Amino acid sequence: MLRRLPPVPAWTSALVATVVGFGGTVALIVQATRAVGASAAQAGSAVTASCLGVAVAGAALSFGLRMPVVLAWSTPGAALLAAAAPGTSWAVAVGVFLAAALMTIVVGAVPTLGRWAERIPSSVASAMLAGVLLPFCLEVFRTGGTDPLLVAVVVAVFLVVRQRAPRYALVLVLAAGVALTLLRGDAARLQPGATLGTLAATRPSFDARAIVSLGVPLFLVTLVSQNLPGLVVLRVAGYRPRTRPLLLGTGLASLAMAPFGAHAVNLAAITAAICTSREAHPDRAKRWTVGVLYATFYLLLALLSPALVRLFLALPHAVIAALTGVALIPALVGAIETMLAAKAERDAAIVTFLAAGSGLTLFGLGSAFWGLAVGLLALAARRR
C-alpha cells in the first residue's frame, strides 16, 4: 500500500506550492473583494469558492490529462479588481466574473479564437498589467510616511529572502508583517463569523460598462499573464498540453464558482514550476499525482478560508497595503520585462503603462480599458 503512495518530494513540492500560492496573495484577494463591495461573509465565500475551483478542476484535469495541471486564482486579475472604480457593487462584480469566465470558455471552444488569443501583443497586455500593479507597489512606500517600521521590516525581509530562497519570500513577508502587527497589538478584534468554509451565492447584475471596463481586462490579463505562461511551464517540463481542454476546464470552473465570488480560476505559472519539475517526482509519467496532491491541499484551505479571511480583515489597512504591494513586486518586474522586450513596440507599451496606471475613469470605463485601447491604437498606427 505504501509503495503506491507518491514519494515524499511530491508531497513537499505540492505543500510548498500551496503555501506560496495561497499565503503570498490571499491579502490581495481580500482587498480586491472588499474594493468591489463584498461583505466579510462574501469575501470568505469568494476565497472558499476560489480554493474549491482550484482543487476540483485541478484534480480533474491532472487525473484526466495525466500531467500536473496546477491551477490558481488570478493575481493580476485581483489587482485589477482592487483598483476598480469606487462604487462598484458586489452584484455587478459577480456579473463581471461570469462574463470573463464565458470569454475564456468561448476562446477555449473555438480553435480559431484560441490561435488569435496567442497572438495578442504581449508587450501591450503586459504594459496594461504593469500599469495596474504599479499603484499597489508604490503604496508600500507611501505607507512608510505613517509606519516606517512596518515598511522597513517587510521590504528588508523581501529583499534578503529573495536573494537566499526566492520561493519563500512572499510567505515570509506575510509572516513578518502579521507577527509585527501582533507584537505591537495593532490587530483589531476578529469579527464574528463562520470558521469552516461556506458558500454564499449572489445574484449577478450585468452592467455593460463594468463588463467592458473590468470584464474584458480581467479576461485578457488572466489569459496573457496566467494561462499562456502556464501552458509554457507544462511544455518546458516535457508535456504536450492541448490548449482547448485546459481553457475549457478553467473557464468552466470559473463559471461555476463565480456566483459565490471567485473572480477567476486559471493555470498557475510560478507554483506550477514547483510541481512540474523533476525534483517534485522523478517519473514524468507519474508526476500528475503532484497536481492531485496540490489540489488536495487547496481543498483543505477551502475548509478554513472564512477564518483566514477574518484574520486578514483584523489587520490594519496599512499592513494589508504593505503586504499586497510587496507581494506584487515580482509580478510587476515580470510585466515590465515583457513589455519592454520588443524594442519596436516600446512606445506603445509605455503609453499603455502610463494610461493604465493613471487611474483615469472616462465614460464609466476604468484606466485598464483605456490603457489597453491606447496601446492597441498606437500599435495599429505604427504598423500602418
Image (tube, helix red, strand yellow):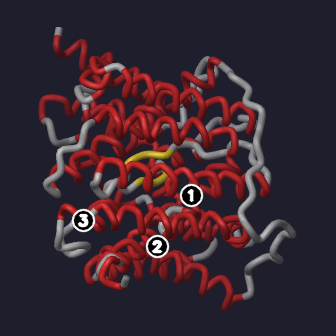
Q: Amino acid at mark 2?
A: Val
Q: Amino acid at mark 3?
A: Lys
The percent position of residue 223, horizontal first and vertical second, equals: 37, 37
Give residue 165's quadrant in the image: bottom left
- Which label lies toward us, 3 or 2? 3
Q: Residue at x 52, y 42 (%)?
A: 253
Q: Which residue is mark 1?
A: 51
Q: Residue at x 50, y 70 (%)?
A: 297
Q: Quadrant of the N terminus?
A: bottom left
- Which label lies toward us, 1 or 2? 1
Q: CA distance from mark 1 to mark 3?
A: 24 Å
Near mark 3 (Cα within 10 A), the count class, few <14, some 14-19 or many ≥20, is few
Q: Earlier in the sequence, mark 1 or mark 2?
A: 2
- Which label lies toward us, 1 or 3? 3
Q: Give the residue furthest to the bottom.
A: 183
**In the image, is residue 77 above or below residue 213?**
below
Left or right for 107, reference 287: right
Q: Which residue is mark 2?
A: 19
Q: Secondary structure at mark 1?
A: helix
Is residue 311 something that shows in the picture? yes
